Image (cartoon, grey):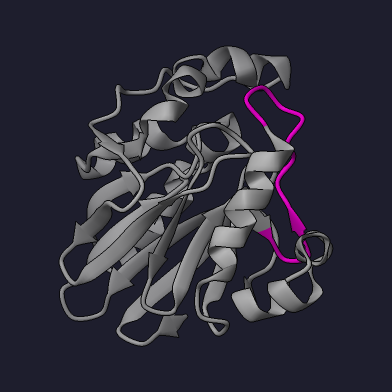
Amino acid sequence: MRKGPLRFEILAVGPLAANCVIIWERQSLGAIVVDPGDEPERIVDLINDSSLKVGCIVCTHAHFDHVGAVPELKEATGAPVALHADEIEIYSGVRDQAALWGYEIDPLPPPDVFLKDGDYVEVGAVRMEVIHTPGHSPGGICLYGPGLAVTGDTLFAGSIGRTDFYGGDHGLIMRSLRRLAALPGDTIVLPGHGPSSTIGEEVENNPFYQELGL
């Protein structure tokens, strides 16, 4: 799919169907891979089939279903791994977290880059702003670029991420939703699970936005 100069593809991977989002620019083929949670062979096949040049692997948060394929993807591409510093505790303990759910994942490589609110992830002509959106987890982030918002488990079509996990906070996620509401209404929302939407659709119809009174 495309939005202006950017192309994107969503792969629902793993038993929890987490969305791995690949964003690239059609001329340079520079790409960002967001949340490679599982099935690394599918992700790498798409990268190779499209001749993409992955310049960064971004984790919107560190729950196991969003980071499980990071080791294989880093090995295949050599790209740095980036996440928010407030997520390092969850990232470091992700194998124990996965085991509690009955899954096993390989040890994760240390992060190469710590992102903060207002930073930009830039690969070739792809430039995505980092928006710190805690609530589902302490270091949750969204990425915003021309017409696109990758929202991880902060905002879904018609819902939001759970806040009853370790580090979750309902009040914080509601504040994060308010920040996302300031994005243009036609911005395509690429969530961490489920179908895509737009900011305008969510502000108008998502019950959690109705709770905010927007």
Q: Is residue 170 left or right of residue 135?
A: right
Tell me if residue 46 comes above or below residue 74 in the rendering.
below
Name the residue at 30% across, 22% down: 110
Q: Residue at x 82, y 67 (%)?
A: 210
Q: Which residues are magenta?
A: 156-168
The quadrant of the picture occupied by the C terminus is bottom right
- Is 172 inside the magenta-drawn segment? no
Residue 164 on the magenta segment: yes
Q: Is residue 49 visible in this depiction of the protein?
A: yes
Q: Main secondary structure of the magenta part?
A: loop
Seen at 70% across and 41% down, the residue is 171
Residue 21 drawn above or below residue 148: above
Q: Residue 91 or 33: which is nearer the viewer?
A: 91
Viewed as shown, does residue 173 lie left or right of 152? right
> Does residue 192 appear anywhere in the picture?
no
> Up-down: is 66 above or below 112?
below
Q: Position of residue 111 (x, y in %)?
A: 29, 28
Residue plotted at (52% across, 47% down): 133
The percent coordinates of residue 134 (x first, y second) are 55, 40
